[in-house]
Image (cartoon, helix red, strand yellow):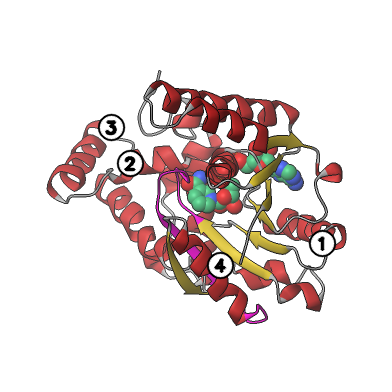
Amino acid sequence: MNLKKIVVIGAGTMGSGIAQWFTQQKCSVELVDNSDEQLSRALKSIHISWDKLLEKKKLSLEEITEMKESLSIKKLDIVSKDADLVIEAIIENLEIKKDLFNKLDQYFNSHTILSSNTSSFPIELMAAAVSSERRKRFVGLHFFNPATIMKLVEVIRPKDADEQLCHDLYQWFDSKDKRPALCKDSPGFIVNRVARNFYGEPLRIVESDNESKMKEVDHILREVGGFKMGPFELMDLIGIDVNYSVTCSVWEAYQREPRFAPHALQKQMVEEKRLGRKAKRGFYKYD
Ligand code: NAI
């Protein structure tokens, strides 16, 4: 497998990280969003991140220049129809994703692989929006935040996807210093299913919006438990809205099993727009 031309749709937290990572693998990347403002912001922050790598002498000026030339921001109707791989990383809303995939199926050449970075929706539900031929080339590629740093990529195979294609994708990521995992197409896949309790139980432990208790739980899990981040710090990084919607859809998918139930505080914070680091206010305040 040789992935050279990549289109990433959605230039938010995940899409911009995924676009940056693919560009760093010497792919030619076109980044798309329905907000022009978000697109310019994403491009600017990727350039800043590369400039920092140059300052730290982790990459050469030649490499940075080449990467800047290989990454472009575009409107969806002018991206390359012959892309090898499209990764969707837009808002976690099933109907909007299905509508987009229906358009993508008609737009791209038959060899193009379509994929979703959804955190929680079964890939099969989105694959239903494309033709039966394309379904063979429709998979889930679930990256983790920050996508440039986190090694794991879940490669999810819905029932109609070509088995060899999934193995080839696995091999490709493996050769690029990611740690791929082949997953069944079940709600939450592997990590987001296990992680529900990493968020849900701490929320039930603190019970209410109590910052000092949250700090204590974060401290214990980080310093004693050996986790890189505590659950409240991690939810703030992921985005309270993103995490809440994943919780709800995994809970629904498992027939509202109590162990997956969302906490009232998550809903309240979404309504109050306390969305985590991106809003400078989540469980904690940020400057
Ligand atoms: P985000 O809210 O940061 O970014 C979403 C972007 O999609 C926004 O820039 C928005 O303008 C754009 N958008 C919305 N509808 C669009 C459309 N129809 N066409 C083009 N662009 C559109 O969200 P985030 O966090 O990047 O999540 C994106 C996807 O990745 C979701 O499916 C989420 O579940 C998944 N994900 C999120 C992770 C996280 O830690 N935030 C981790 C792994 C997966």
Asked whether 158 falls inside the magenta stretch, the response is: yes
The residue that disc 2 covers is 232
Residue 244 visible in this rendered orientation of the protein: no
Q: Which residue is mark 4?
A: 169
> Which stretch is magenta?
143-162
- Distance from disc 3 to disc 2, alpha carbons, whole Å, reads 10 Å
Q: Which residue is mark 1?
A: 102
Q: Nearer the viewer, mark 3 or mark 2?
A: 2
How far apart marks 3 and 1 lie (CA) works out to: 44 Å
Q: Earlier in the sequence, mark 1 or mark 4?
A: 1
Q: CB under 8 Å between callouts 1 and 2? A: no
Query: In the rendering, at what x and y percent does residue 112 appear?
Result: 75, 63
- Nearer the observer, disc 3 or disc 1? 1
Asked if the beta carbon under badge 2 is closer than 8 A to the nearest atom of ligand 1, the reply is no
Looking at the picture, which amino acid does disc 1 mark? Asn
Q: Which residue is mark 3?
A: 211
Residue 200 in the magenta stretch? The answer is no
Q: Write down the quadrant of residue 215 in the picture.
A: top left
